[in-house]
Amino acid sequence: MRSSDPLGECPSICPWGTLRRTPTRTPTPPPCTDADADGHCSIATGGDDCNDANSKVYPGANDTKGKQGHDRIDNDCDGIIDG
């Protein structure tokens, strides 16, 4: 930095040819989204909800008993339909 630019405010390439350093920024991870409000973030945003459009589908959901257990959907995100 030269005395004619004491605060380092010259553009990326200063008039005298010196390249000003630009700080590198770490990208911020996307926020967790839970579109179906079941308490589990979508897989796309780092969560474990395999279907963020259906509030009855999330890890740990009932997938073996009653009406929900026989709906031909993998409700508990384990990769097995109704099991």
Image (cartoon, rainbow, N blue to C red):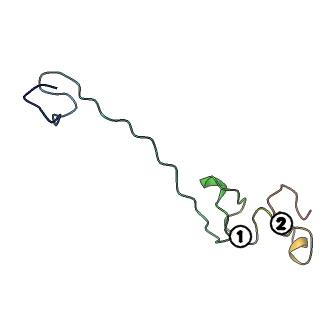
Q: Nearer the viewer, residue 7 or 34?
A: 7
Number of residues whose C-alpha sits closer than 10 Å to that of mark 1, classed few (under 14), some (14–19) or many (20 or more):
some
Number of residues whose C-alpha sits closer than 10 Å to that of mark 2, classed few (under 14), some (14–19) or many (20 or more):
some
Kindly give the residue lying farthest to the left in the view shown: 4
Kindly give the residue lying farthest to the bottom in the view shown: 67
Is residue 37 positioned above or below 22 on the image? below
The Cα–Cα distance between marks 1 and 2, rounded to whole angstroms, is 11 Å
Answer with left or right where residue 38 lies relative to residue 26: right
Task: Please provide percent x and percent y for residue 41.
Answer: 64, 61
Residue type at mark 1: give it.
Asn
Q: Nearer the viewer, residue 14 or 7?
A: 7
Given contact means CB atoms under 8 Å apart, are the residues at marks 1 and 2 in contact? Answer: yes
Give the residue at mark 2. Answer: 73
Task: Please provide percent x and percent y for residue 33.
Answer: 58, 62
Q: Residue, x 61% and y 68% (percent of image)?
A: 35
- Helix, strand or loop at mark 2: loop
Q: Quadrant of residue 57?
A: bottom right
Answer with left or right where residue 13 lies relative to residue 34: left
Task: Please provide percent x and percent y for residue 67.
Answer: 89, 78
Q: How many marks?
A: 2
Disc number for residue 41: none
Answer with left or right where residue 20 lies relative to residue 42: left
Question: Which tag, 1 or 2, sits closer to the chain's start?
Answer: 1
Residue type at mark 2: give it.
Ile
In the rendered view of the protein, which quadrant contains the C terminus? Answer: bottom right
Q: Residue, x 65% and y 59% (percent of image)?
A: 42
In the rendered view of the protein, which quadrant contains the N terminus? Answer: top left
Give the residue at mark 1. Answer: 54
Is residue 56 positioned above or below 10 on the image? below
- Helix, strand or loop at mark 1: loop
